[in-house]
Image (cartoon, rainbow, N blue to C red):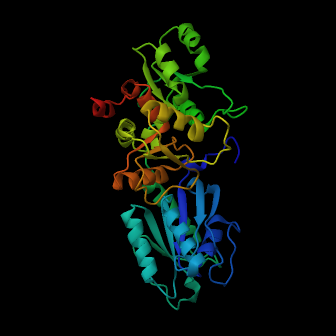
Amino acid sequence: MGLNDTVSAERPHIGFFGLRNAGKSSVVNAVTGQKLSLVSDIKGTTTDPVKKAMELLPIGPVVIIDTPGIDDSGVLGEMRVKRTMQVLEQTDIALLIIDGQKGLSPADRHLIELFEQKNITYIKVFNKSDKLEKIPAAGQNEIYVCATSGEGIYDLKEMIGRAAKIAKTERPLISDLIEPGDVAVLVVPIDSAAPKGRLILPQQQTIRAILDAGAIAVVTREKELEATLSSLKDKPKIVITDSQAFEQVDKITPRDITLTSFSILFARYKGDLKEAVKGAAALDSLNDGSRVLISEGCTHHRQCDDIGTVKMPKWVEKYTGKKLSFEFTSGGEFPDDPTGFDLVIHCGGCMLGEREMKSRIRRCVEKNVPITNYGIAIAQMHGILGRSVKAFPDIAAILK
């Protein structure tokens, strides 16, 4: 993916589901106009979810996901079905591919129940229409297609486009906190963990959101923050810092300037800021032997001073004064059932879609497991959480 491409986390995720040999992969290839998935008459040809970031008209940038058959069997088959179920947690729009000759199966009906439970916009796609003597009238959110001839594929793409509009949620990153002409100062530490020659994704996205709002973005390191603030003719509307520099930035930034962090902005943008703030309070009730899960949404190369596996455990044990048991996950790994953990500390989730991030939070909330994120945990440990969420009155009220 190039520097100018829309990141996968910000693209609608379109999942193709159904039984083996219903023609899922054939429909994927027909919709995308590419040989994205391997096709054969042998059941179970697709053995793992196949993901592809691409442009799909009339929507634009999307992620296409082809999944193994939901009726796969055997030990490996059960594992494949589990992977398919995991894809549901990432899916914004689901296409249920049905063999038009056989109609809906019990497994198909179960998938529809799951789509509705998870509030996923879905389309029932009856494939192999060329083998039907008469094509029935399609119901709501239904369409008959023939993947091999292309019949109905254009109309299906139009339906996907309409579904994408329904599934899309408008949520502000920072636009509701600033006005055109306001100055926003972004504090970006440059240490050994910082990528060479570029800013990390949350910083890039925040700068873009500031520019889109007609405001002015000023980027500086924590070492130059004091000089930066002194050089500005007018005081900035807000200072946004990397969480690792929270303590230093809090001391430098005047009290009449709003201070928050990238992690806090992203907790609101694609997670649940209220749950994250409530979850941070669990840091004060940890005991010796308490189990803490630290989870990263990406799979970046670990540095010797990695925040997730090195810094965060040290900070938490120093703050609590307890000897804790830490476990770690990264990328797509996250427990289906987090029962047994006393606290989950998640990264900001910049590489995860909104639906997947909220799914992880929901799993914790349903099992009464507190969950917070890096930035909010750091603010709590430095005693500045109240100040860092002051811009959000409904959230600040939780701490009173």
Q: Nearer the viewer, residue 338 or 246?
A: 338
Residue most extreme to the bottom: 133
Residue at position x 36%, y 26% from top?
A: 386
Q: How many marks?
A: 0
Q: Please tell me whether residue 14 is drawn above or below residue 361 in the rendered image.
A: below
Q: Tell me the quarter of the picture where residue 283 sits.
A: top left
Residue at position x 45%, y 27% from top?
A: 260
Q: Please tell me whether residue 6 is drawn above or below residue 107 in the rendered image.
A: above
Q: Position of residue 182 (x, y in %)?
A: 48, 20
Quadrant (top left/top right/bottom left/bottom right) for the C terminus: top left
Q: Nearer the viewer, residue 99 or 351?
A: 351
Q: Position of residue 82 (x, y in %)?
A: 52, 69
**Could one spot residue 375 in this view of the protein?**
no
Residue most extreme to the right: 197
Q: Position of residue 28 (x, y in %)?
A: 61, 69
**Could one spot residue 267 in this view of the protein?**
yes
Residue at position x 42%, y 39% from top?
A: 268
Question: In the displayed structure, does residue 332 sit left or right of residue 256?
Answer: right
Q: Nearer the viewer, residue 17 or 296?
A: 296
Q: Position of residue 73 (x, y in %)?
A: 55, 81
